[in-house]
Amino acid sequence: MDEAAVDFRLRGNDEYLSFFEVADEDEGRRVAAAFRVIRDGRPDSIDFIIFARQSLLDAGIEVEHKPDDCLPEFLSSRHVGTRGLHHEPKREFIIQLLLDDSKIVIRLKPKEIEQLARRLLDEIPSLRDHLGEHWRAIISSE
């Protein structure tokens, strides 16, 4: 519970919470894989949760599209962030979200991330320019 709450807190100099808006679980997996492989950290699993945008609105948290020039277009076009006075949800929201049967929690392991990334690179070759060093070595090795 407390681990999940960390993802709903502003960090450092962040002005808003960031999310990626996806249409479904498949797109969520593709976005999560792309997000993982553009990072310089060592290849590792990634955990993410898919939930209705309305959940945030019901908690009084507004979101808007916030394209991010630091991200590849595939991610930037799906990037949303909180706005207004209220950026961080209360603990009750997080508990409710985690108990909500409509949310989807997914863990992608490195091998699945690699497979998804390879497919994405076939579709979006420019994504290769954004690969983190460790992922670049893995994807280039085969």
Image (cartoon, grey):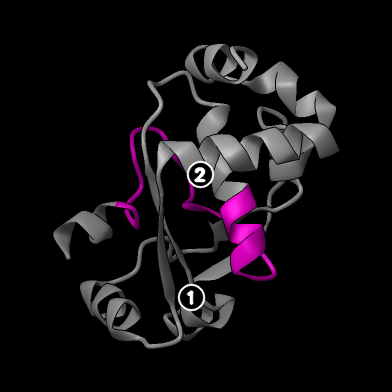
Q: Nearer the viewer, mark 2 or mark 1?
A: 2
Residue 39 placement, left or right of 45: right
Q: Is residue 79 magenta?
A: no
Tags 2 and 1 touching, CB below 8 Å: no
Mark 2 is on which residue type?
A: Glu
Q: Which residue is mark 2?
A: 112
Quarter occupied by the C terminus:
top right
Stretch of the chain drawn in magenta? 7-30
Q: Nearer the viewer, residue 108 or 64?
A: 108
Q: Residue at x 59, y 67 (%)?
A: 25
Percent position (x, y) of residue 95? Answer: 24, 78
Percent position (x, y) of residue 75? Answer: 69, 43
Residue 56 - label: 1
Q: Residue at x 29, y 76 (%)?
A: 98
Residue 134 placement, left or right of 116: left
Q: Residue at x 37, y 41 (%)?
A: 45
Q: Is residue 63 above or below residue 9?
A: below
Q: Nearer the viewer, residue 49 or 95?
A: 49
The answer to whether residue 35 of the structure is visible from this angle is no
Mark 1 is on which residue type?
A: Leu
Percent position (x, y) of residue 49? Answer: 43, 64
